[in-house]
Amino acid sequence: MKDIRQIINEALEKIKNADVAALESVKTEYLGKNGVLTQILKSLSSRSIEDKKRIGSEANNAKSVIEVEIESKKENLKKALLDEKMREEKLDCSKSFYFPFSKGSFHPIIQTMRDISVVFKSLGFAVAEGPEIETEWYNFEALNIPESHPARDAQDTFYLEGAKALLRTHTSPGQIHVMEKHKPPIRVIVPGKVYRNEASDATHFSTFHQVEGLAVDENVTFADLKAVVSDFIRKFFRSDIGMRFRPSHFQFTEPSAEVDMQCVFCKGKGCRLCKFSGWIEILGCGMVHPNVLKSVRYDCEKYTGYAFGLGVERITMFKYGIDDIRLFYENDLRFLRQF
Ligand code: FA5
């Protein structure tokens, strides 16, 4: 009894003054395989049953006392270390300091794509992505534009050399990817970069961005399309800006329409930008053509849908009053810093 009490006192004294490394040696010395207390317990085999009970219980009790003390000392040491670190690394957030770099910002096109996504998400649309390199099937055939159809010439295509692949000319192939993977009901937008082999001017560029929209379900009508597009434009521009639906033609929609916005540069009077019409086209849309639904094996008797493709550069020009699309891609910091 006396010995064990002495052992405890001795161990507690060592623990009191130990650092992290010393704690480990104390642990080995008393509780380890060949530790003092383990030896005592091992030696009991030759003793009487009464001794075994009494000394065994005292030794086990001593083991737990020492173990608890080591753990609590460890915690205290850890806390002290952390406190010291916090003291050393303390930041005075009230101090102002000189930061020699100007803050970066998102490119206006990326910012617009994010803003567009926020509005459509609020209208219940999910956001998906499609590849920029496509096959003719996704970019044309599945969209009801067969080979040798004149509609293929309407979008001058960059073909990849030696491969039967091309740079997508619009985000509409995104419709096919989504429908192949999911069953109706579908409400999705597909934002992305598109490429066309065409000459640039103030409102056209060879690389630009579109946001595709697609909704497919039972009983979807043109009225739903009109409501969603009008609601989007109101929310995006935060005003009742002049807009009109104009009948048009796309192979993948029937009926088809284009949406024009009243030219913000001349307020509809007619200028160089709107080609003196007072309106600038911002999106194409329509009811998904039954052949497109068939190409993804949807039941076109049961489901109908609408789709739209929005020009991101065009609506960014509108929002900020930018009169030349090429400004987005010149990387002139004086232009970019305004956003
Ligand atoms: C299309 O690309 C169709 N895929 C849109 C569509 C989708 C119709 C779904 C029906 C259903 P379009 O070629 O008109 O259509 O282009 C759509 C929009 O992209 C245009 O309204 C315009 O805002 C923008 N756009 C077209 N060409 C250019 C260009 N070269 N530079 C910048 N923006 C362009």
Image (cartoon, rainbow, N blue to C red):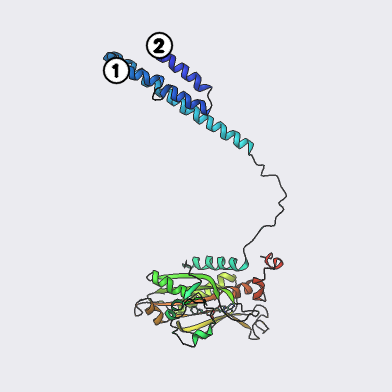
Vertical side of 203 occupied by 336: above or below? above
334 up-or-down from 54: above or below: below
Specify whether 88 is left or right of 29: right
The residue shown at (34%, 77%) is 299
Residue drawn where x is 51% and y is 83% of the image: 257
Which of 292/96 is in front?
Answer: 292
Identified by mark 2, the residue type is: Lys
The spot of residue 5 in percent (x, y) is 42, 14
Amino acid at circle 1: Ser
Report the Cα–Cα distance between label 1 and label 2: 20 Å
Of discs 1 and 2, which sits in the foreground? Answer: 1
Please tell me how crowded label 1 is: few (under 14), some (14-19), or many (20+) other residues with Cα within 10 Å. few
Q: Secondary structure at mark 2?
A: helix
Q: Looking at this rendering, what residue extends furthest in the front direction?
A: 162
Q: Earlier in the sequence, mark 1 or mark 2?
A: 2
The numbered mark at residue 45 is: 1
Label 2 sits on residue: 2
Q: Around disc 2, counting alpha carbons within 10 Å, would you say few (fewer than 14), some (14 to 19), or many (20 or more)? A: few
Q: Residue at x 52, y 70 (%)?
A: 191
